Each structure stands twice: as C-alpha cells, then as structure tokens.
Image (cartoon, rainbow, N blue to C red):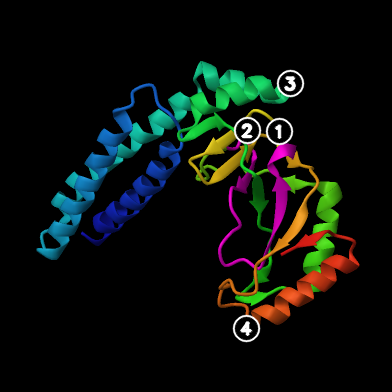
C-alpha cells in the first residue's frame, strides 16, 4: 500500500503542476481544461477521504492512481496540442524573424489573460536585492544596475510563468511599484514597445530576449513597509540612493 499511496501522492502533485502549466494557454476547447481540473480535484478529495477513513489500501490506491494518471495525460495533451498549433508555430517564426507586430498579434491567441492595450503610465522591474534573508549591499546592487544599462534585462520563459514559455520568452514588467521591495527599475510607458501586451491588469509582457530601455531607479517611499529582511529601511534606502548616484544612475523616490 505504501508504494501505491506514494505514487498517488506524486501523481496528484504532478497534476497540480500540469494544471498551472496548462492554465497559461488558451485551448481550442475552452471547456476541456476546467473539466480536467474538476476531475483532478475530485480525485484528490477522494484520495484524502479514503486516507482519513483508513481505506487507501493497494487496490483502492491503484484505482485512484490510474484515474489521476489518465487526467494528467489529458492535461499534457492539451499543452502539447497548443504548442503544436498553427498560431504557436507562426509566433515562433515571427519571433525568429524579429517581426514584433506579427508576434504581438499572435501571442494573445496563444496565452490566456494576455491582450493588447494602452501602455501603463510606467512599468517596473524588480532586481535581485536580497539573498538568504538578508538585503544585498547597496554598492553591489548599484553596480549590477549600472551593468544592466548596457546588458538589458534578460527574458524569462519557464513552463510555469504566465504569458511566456521556453520557445516564446519575454520580459515581464509590473504595472505598479512592487510592494515590499526597496527599489525597482522604472520605465516610462511612452518608451515601451507597441503594441503593448498586458497580462491581466498588473503585468506587461515584452517579447524580446533582452529589454534595453532607459530607466530610472525608483526607491520605495520611507513610509512604505518593506520586507522584514530590511532591519533599518530608512538607512538602507539612503544607502541605495547614494550608491546609485555614485554609479551615475538616475534615482527617484
């Protein structure tokens, strides 16, 4: 029973990951994924009820495991079908050809919650500013930001991030200053590539390998609550402002 129960737990975990992966795409059958999600959740509930009642013996566990495996395969087929579709192939071709207008027209057909819209007044990107629960030295952050002026922000494209994937990566910006972070790069909306692709109402997707645009270092206001990693927010913000100024970076609060 232990082996079957462990396999079932792993299959349910995999199913949850597959759901997150599949949910970022638009699918030919809009009802297919919700139906599979409901089936997977129901199977998870069934497994928990059996376990609480002490009835998750080998046969019952195998029965639920087989059903979960079938659902997982169906979810994976949805993902594979989307990535083999004509719009997807055309988007990959447009990206390879550097045809941004065509790419921007195709991406909302492929990704859920992605749509063309007017750019926000400003967009923000949060650099890495802490490690192992401690804020990085202000001088190190400022140096890395100076390097970003030339290198640009690299795209992301992992399977579980909405609006992008490995063959269609992009840079994700926030439409508002990130809460809890002491700083972010601020891009004027007028400098963003058009058409602007908005993911839900809070993110902007720039389908480029690297984003090289003028930015200003936006610091959090002194009265804003920062993540608990920052023991002395006013002192840390002052240090960031000095370090960025020494690197010739424009700073705003």
Q: Residue at x 53, y 45 (%)?
A: 161
Q: Which residue is mark 1?
A: 193
Q: Quadrant of residue 137?
A: bottom right
Q: Which mark is residue 97?
A: 3
Q: Position of residue 113 (x, y in %)?
A: 46, 35
Q: Is residue 246 above or below residue 163?
A: below
Q: Which residue is mark 2?
A: 196
Circle 2 sits in a helix, a strand or a loop, which is it? Answer: strand
Would you call the spot at circle 2 few (<14 residues within 10 Å), some (14-19), or many (20 or more)?
some
Q: CA distance from mark 2 to mark 3?
A: 19 Å
Provide the residue span drawn in magenta: 165-191
Picture quarter with the N terminus? bottom left
- Give how far apart the Cα atoms at labels 3 and 1 are: 17 Å
Splitting the image into 4 quarters, where does residue 100 fall?
top right
Q: CA distance from mark 4 to mark 3?
A: 48 Å
Visible in this render: residue 133?
Answer: yes
Q: Is residue 93 visible?
A: no
Residue 231 is tagged as 4
Secondary element at image label 1: loop
Front residue (pair 47, 161): 161
**Pointer 4: residues within 10 angstroms few (<14), some, or many (20+)?**
few
Q: CA distance from mark 4 to mark 1?
A: 38 Å
């Amino acid at each position: 029973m232990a082996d079957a129960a462990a396999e079932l737990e792993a299959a349910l975990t995999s199913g949850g990951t597959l759901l997150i992966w599949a949910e970022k795409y638009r699918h030919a059958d809009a009802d297919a994924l919700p139906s599979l999600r409901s089936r997977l959740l129901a199977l998870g509930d069934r497994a928990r009820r059996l376990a609480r009642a002490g009835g998750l013996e080998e046969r019952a566990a195998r029965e639920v495991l087989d059903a979960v495996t079938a659902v997982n395969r169906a979810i994976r087929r949805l993902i594979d079908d989307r990535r083999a579709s004509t719009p997807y192939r055309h988007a990959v071709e447009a990206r390879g050809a550097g045809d941004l207008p065509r790419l921007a027209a195709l991406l909302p057909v492929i990704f859920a919650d992605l749509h063309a819209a007017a750019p926000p007044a400003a967009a923000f990107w949060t650099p890495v500013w802490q490690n192992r629960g401690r804020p990085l030295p202000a001088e190190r952050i400022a140096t890395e930001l100076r390097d970003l002026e030339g290198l640009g922000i690299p795209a992301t494209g992992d399977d579980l991030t909405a609006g992008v994937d490995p063959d269609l990566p992009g840079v994700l910006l926030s439409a508002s200053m990130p809460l809890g972070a002491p700083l972010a790069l601020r891009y004027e909306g007028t400098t963003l590539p058009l058409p602007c692709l908005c993911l839900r109402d809070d993110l902007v997707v720039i389908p480029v390998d690297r984003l090289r645009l003028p930015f200003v270092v936006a610091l959090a206001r002194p009265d804003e609550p920062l993540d608990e990693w920052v023991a002395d927010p006013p002192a840390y913000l002052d240090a960031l402002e000095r370090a960025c100024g020494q690197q010739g970076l424009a700073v705003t609060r």
